[in-house]
Every structure is written in C-alpha cells, then in structure tokens.
Amino acid sequence: MKCLICNSSNVKKILLIHEVSRYTGTPHPLYKCKNCGLIRPDPLPYSDDTKLDIYDVSENIKFYDKKEDKIDTKSYEYIYYFKHFKPFISLVKKYKIKGKALDIGCGAGHLLKMLNKEGLVAEGTEISPRLVKALKKDSLKVYCAELGNKQLKKNNYNLITFNQVLEHIVDPESFLKEVNSLLHSEGYVILAVPYLYGLVPQILRTKWYGLGYGQHVNFFSQESMRILLERNGFKLQEFKILSVDYAHPNFPSFLNVIANLITSVIVSLGLGDNLFVVAKKVKGAKR
C-alpha cells in the first residue's frame, strides 16, 4: 500500500478509529502516511459511481423542500447556515479577490449568494440534478456536474471555492488539475476540508462528524495538502485552522453559548477540526 500523495510505503493503520460505510454498514479502517500525513480508508467506502445514491435523494438534500421542489430559503435553519461561510468571505476580502467565481459543490447556494453580494459574479456546480433544478428556481447559475461540464470555460475564473468537497474526491490529483485549468493566471482557490488532526476528532474518534459516514475518502494533513497543491500548479498562501459550528439553531441558547466558548478556545489553541486553505495559481501554469 502506497500513499496517494507522496507515494511513500510507510503507511500504518490507525488504531481505535474507522469509517463506517453509509452504503453497507461495513467498517473501513484508516491508514496514515508517516511521511506526509495523508489519512485514507482502505478499501474505499464508495466510488464516483455511487455518489448519487446519496446526493440525489431528496431526504438527504439539506434545506430541500420535496413538496415544493425547491430550496426552503425562508426557514430559520437556512438563514442561520450562512454563518458557516463567513471565513470564505473574510479571505476573499483579505486577498481583494474580484471578478468571476465558481463554487464547486455549492449545496443550497449560500456561498454563491454571499459571493454575489461581495460583487463577484458567482456560478456553481452540483452533481444532483434535483438540487440543480431547485437552485435555478432560486435564480442561481448552476451547472450539473462536479467538474467536466462543457459550459465551464478554461481560464475563466478569478476564484474557485469548494467547501467540504475535496475529502469526497477519489482522485484529488485529477480534480485539482481541472480546477487549475479553469482559473485565470494567478487566480485563487479557497477551500475547506474536515481536519482529522484537530482536538475534537481525537476525542470523538469514530463518532466525529468529519468521517462522513462512509462518504469521505481523504483526510489531509497540512503537509499532504501543500504537496498536492504545489504539484498541480498552485502556490500555498495560507492555512487557517478553524472549527465547524457545533452550536445549532434548535439548541437552547445556553448550550450554544457553551459550545461557542469551547470552540473559541479550541481554535485559539490551533486545534480546530476544519482546515481552510488559500492557494494561488502559479503564473503561466498550464494543466
């Protein structure tokens, strides 16, 4: 067994943690590369061919109103969910990114709307035909694809974002090559992935949300992410270790206060469980 990122054979099984397949209920052990830190289940819990078994089922589409066949943009939970994307907007402002943006795996369209509000011209992709139809009803420009849709033009975007996507990609190398080809020279990528090296994952182990119930096939360390990006024509700008929001709109307010306080402390110690990455396409890089 060799590491997908650095090709090292120094790969060891991680004890006391595994990923349970949502498809079969089978536990999949995790293996860590001792060289670059990439963690990956073996065998993989799913393939590209099985994605729609989860992502095009109406009950699994977040904020989807099955009866109306649209996104429920009026619900409190939908409105609350915008806060998850604030770090993306902060980074867009920090790097003064303007122009056209593409959000891969755009979900219910929160980040698309926020990017448009910041003055970018945002488009999205989603693999669920059902979700794409619903997003278009919400006046968003979305393509039915992960990547590979013929309407996605090369060298066309100043920014490409993907939130909680790269951990699902069986072949992240090919994925990033395609992302690179869609960016203008010196365009930016901003992405976020679950970070297994955080404190909460080390405590919750197999119960941690970020294992994805058999939907996640990559768990990146900072080093493995750096290697992957640089090999595919990007220059790393920064890592930002944050955390998912463990508060919830349906929880009592005092519980959310406690959850936010604990999260703030964990993030201040650099032990969050959500890794944000900013990278810039190397000028002249062609993929």
Image: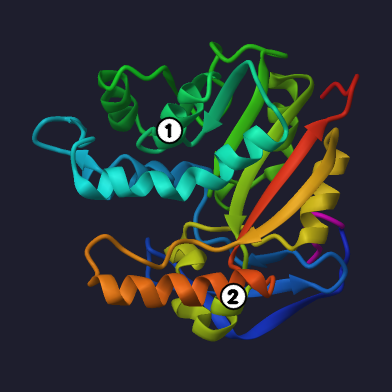
Q: Is residue 170 magenta?
A: no
Can you identify the residue that label 1 sits on?
Answer: 127
Q: Position of residue 129 (x, y in %)?
A: 33, 28
Q: Position of residue 149 (x, y in %)?
A: 53, 19
- Between the residue at mark 1 and the residue at mark 2, the CA separation in whole angstroms equals 34 Å
Tell me which corner region of the image, top left, top right, bottom left or bottom right, holds residue 176: top right
Q: Which mark is residue 266?
A: 2
The answer to which of 110 and 255 lies nearer the viewer is 255
Q: Position of residue 28 (x, y in %)?
A: 54, 72
Q: Which corner quadrant holds the N terminus?
A: bottom right
Label 2 packing within 10 angstroms: few (<14), some (14-19), many (20+): some
The answer to which of 269 and 25 lies nearer the viewer is 269
Q: Amino acid at mark 1?
A: Ile
Verify CB contact (< 8 Å) between mark 1 and mark 2: no
Q: Give the prevailing secondary structure in the magenta stretch.
A: loop
Residue found at x 31% / y 17%:
139
Query: Could you tell me which secondary element the residue under label 2 belongs to?
Result: helix
Q: Which corner quadrant holds the C terminus?
A: top right
Give, as a single range, the part of the protein colored magenta.
1-6
